[in-house]
Amino acid sequence: MKHLLSIESLSAAELHEILDLAVEMKATRGHHAEHPLRHQCWGLIFSKSSTRTRVSFEVGIRELGGDVMFLSSNDIQLGRGEPIEDTARVMGRMLHGAVIRTFAQLDVEQFAQFSGIPTINALTDEEHPCQILADLQTIREKLGSFEGKTIAFVGDGACNVPRSWIWAAIRLGFNLRIAAPESFQPDPMFIGRLGSDRIQVTASVEEAVAGADVLYTDVWVSMGRESETAYRMAQLEKYQINAALLEKAKPGALVMHCLPAYRGKEISADVFEQHAETIFTQAENRLHAQKAILSLLVRR
Ligand code: CP
Ligand code: NVA
């Protein structure tokens, strides 16, 4: 594994390797035997806002012995139109690794190619792999395993988070149901090409959550989609995770949210608070899962 660009590009063995090391990272925080990023400087190149991803990478890189530099795209020439290929070739001669949050998946892939340094996707419009790895770690902690489980994603089924969930389900052998209105469902051609009976897409939120082990949601308005806010609110109104919906899931089902959360929109305030332990464990596990990714990228 040279880069971490998507869940799609990882094998089941690689996913398990990251998750196993994430458990070890969590157990040994504060007294790691190795500091694999010693004498290294990593760059965080972000074109979108972030709380969790930025903090967890900055802390994680330092805990592994490295130094880190946060580079908002507004502050570097990338924001004034310098091509990604040129930015990458410059960074590749100075930094030891890069963590990139941006819009196009192609930009992360080109950065990896042109820089030659380990590159991590910290969210694009297409995938959010680090989030899903932390979520898988959380499900393992809370339910023992994810194999054979049913995860119901409710809300904007066409954005980055459900896309990464789809690839995780394909690779790891759990069932994924996506409940979204037609205009927010993943491309049917893409789902058809996958040819997997583990992935079900429906407009019926009740059908998706019936007996599910996990209910999962994400914001209705992803970064970069702000101009569509009114349309999205109207379309997604019926796709809220709330107490009535939760009753249809398996008793004791987990409720998960990648955060930030908008109470009264994709999740009701009471359900959010009742499941805050799980939701903030997801956030914490970003640190541990990403330290596992960083370690594996520099070990090879
Ligand atoms: N879940 C997540 O990626 O959060 P941030 O946008 O705050 O990094
Ligand atoms: N789908 C959301 C995820 C935020 C972590 C977005 O892209 O804004």
Image (cartoon, grey):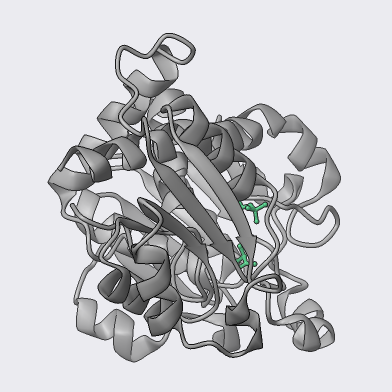
In the image, residue 128 sits, relative to residue 221, either above or below, namely above
202 relative position to 224: left or right: left
Q: Residue at x 83, y 39 (%)?
A: 270
Residue 232 % position (x, y): 74, 81
Question: Number of numbered discs present?
Answer: 0
Residue 71 % position (x, y): 61, 61
251 relative position to 170: left or right: right
Q: Residue at x 35, y 64 (%)?
A: 92
Residue 296, visible in the rendered structure:
yes
In the image, residue 66 sits, relative to residue 87, either above or below, namely above
Residue 249 % position (x, y): 55, 45
- Residue 272 position by quadrant: top right
> Within the displayed image, which quadrant is ligand 2 positioned in?
bottom right
* Front residue (pair 177, 77): 77
- Residue 200 position by quadrant: bottom left
Q: Residue at x 30, y 18 (%)?
A: 34
186 relative position to 169: left or right: right
Q: Residue at x 37, y 53 (%)?
A: 97
Q: Residue furthest top?
A: 31
* Front residue (pair 56, 197): 56
* Front residue (pair 19, 103): 103
Q: Which quarter of the rendered picture does the C terminus lie within?
A: top left
* Front residue (pair 101, 112): 112
Residue 102 % position (x, y): 54, 72
- Residue 277 position by quadrant: top right
Residue 285, visible in the rendered structure:
no
